[in-house]
Amino acid sequence: MKHDSINVRRYLACMDTSAMGNLYTDCIIIGGGVAGLRAALEAAESGRVLMLIKDEIKDSNSFRAQGGIASVLNIDDSFASHIEDTLKTGCDLCDPQAVELTVRQGPAQIKQLLDWGTSFDTEAGQLEAGREGGHSHNRIIHAQGDATGRVMSSTLYDQVSQNKNITVFQHCFVIDILTDDDGCLGVLSWHKKHGFQCIWSKSTILASGGAGQLWRETTNPAGATADGVAMAYRAGAKLADMEFMQFHPTTLYIAGAARMLITEAIRGEGGKLVTAEGESFMHNYHAMGDLAPRDIVSRSIYKELSKASATNVFLDLRHLGSDWLAKRFPTISALCESFDIDVDTDLIPVRPSAHYMVGGVKTDLQGRTNIKGLYCCGEAAATGLHGANRLASNSLLEALVFGQICGKNATVDFTQGDNEIKLRRLTYQHEPSVKVELDVNDVVNSLRSIMWRNVGVEREGKRLTETLEIINFWQRYVMDKVFDTPLQWQCQNMLTVCELITKGALERKESRGVHYRTDYPEQNKKDFAMHIEF
């Protein structure tokens, strides 16, 4: 289903590229997570690559990933089983070709990481594989217990740093993708040291990450504000599945503290979700109990919170013990210690938080968007792999597979045919707004709160309509302004994407995967076995 477009202006900043600093490269990569790093290494085999990172390498969702990477690595498992688990979790919306492509590439991607020096956890000389929600076999490998993302990102960044064809700009905010009738030309960016820059390229890969910061409760770092999705939308890229945000069921809940992820791998090794009275409850909701898919676990927790009028449930590790936790999940062990939680005697307070954006910029199996010369991979992309709900630990696998695909295919733009950078003089002016300016920080805080209340784990039609009205009100006083700081552009991006998410959620009058409508609690296979696009 193609949804009506929302009204946004083409560029956020005024510009005249003839009067600005200009840079030139073969390939631009926006983002520094696993997808962007893998794409850079592939593209650098054929040309010059410039990576533009909003903050720093350590600030990506990839770097923070505690859970592992899913891949078929032992004889008891099979590609067919991994494919079946992914399709089942995706609730009939996965692209079977995307699923098969990704799953079958898993072992090769793991081997490449090992060749580059990634230290995955082993047992008796073999990769140690665990199980997480929705998986029928032990196929999740980890690094340093609960630091898989950090180890993988560090390995890839070491390779990037040694590659003479790759230049990395950190603290570089990409404002917009530059286009003309021929397709993507490059980007308009703002660098912390150098200010505005126009960067021209033969190909551009969008790997800008997630959107968790659109919600008040989230596991995501501060930079996960969906900037890439917003700029792609302004450039005319097609988006899909925006209503599907995955909420991770277990984040540490301490009032006043930031939400910190507690990987479900802990439940894969025996951790139990319990009420304040210590009673296990997940078996009441699903046959897989504590290892049910994430959407089911999150909604089950919500039901328990509603019944008890509570703010959180608990994770029980007392039967596993602090020594086990310190050895197996050292990051989480240190986190509990920092809040004086003794896992030998105490229950760990947890609740769901926004975690992973399933939808994003629509791509084909080659990572191509509908804009010539613009590719997309990682969490910013809607590749068709996840459907309506991402299977645990498929995201790092997807980032590697489609990062490599995008990097490889983008090189065609600068190694075949007419591969000269086509310079244009681009100008854009916007009339100064006569409306009062709202406080951007206040808008962002209020926006995140209403998204959590009304477009969170549970949704309802009247509240979604109300949310759209409120977002549209804020837009009238924010979107018409020409700003000059990243925080202000970020606010505009958040308003754009929040509107798209809410419209998609209102349009999908059913419950499927991570999208749950209390007024339409059943799946409607007749009318909604399709993708909502913008």
Image (cartoon, rainbow, N blue to C red):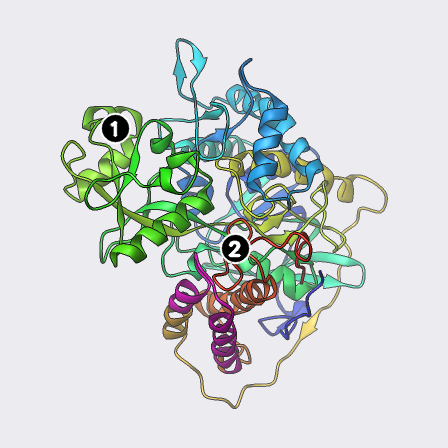
Which residue is under mark 1? 325
Image side of residue 204 versus residue 422, left or right? left
Q: Is residue 452 magenta?
A: yes
Tell me the SS state at disc 2.
loop
* Residue 166 percent across, percent down from the top left: 58, 39
Going by the numbered disc 2, the residue's amino acid type is His
Give the alpha-carbon distance from disc 1 to disc 2, as whole Å. Answer: 33 Å
Q: Is residue 449 above or below residue 337?
A: below
Q: Residue at x 64, y 43 (%)?
A: 94
Relative depth, front residue between 289 and 240: 289
Q: Quadrant of the C terminus?
A: bottom right
Do we see residue 38 in this rendering? no
Q: Which mark is residue 515?
A: 2
* Residue 44 percent across, percent down from the top left: 64, 36
Tell me the SS state at disc 1.
helix
Relative depth, front residue between 123 and 387: 387
Number of numbered discs: 2
Main SS category, magenta section: helix
Going by the numbered disc 1, the residue's amino acid type is Leu
| Residues shaded magenta | 448-476
Relative depth, front residue between 53 and 242: 242
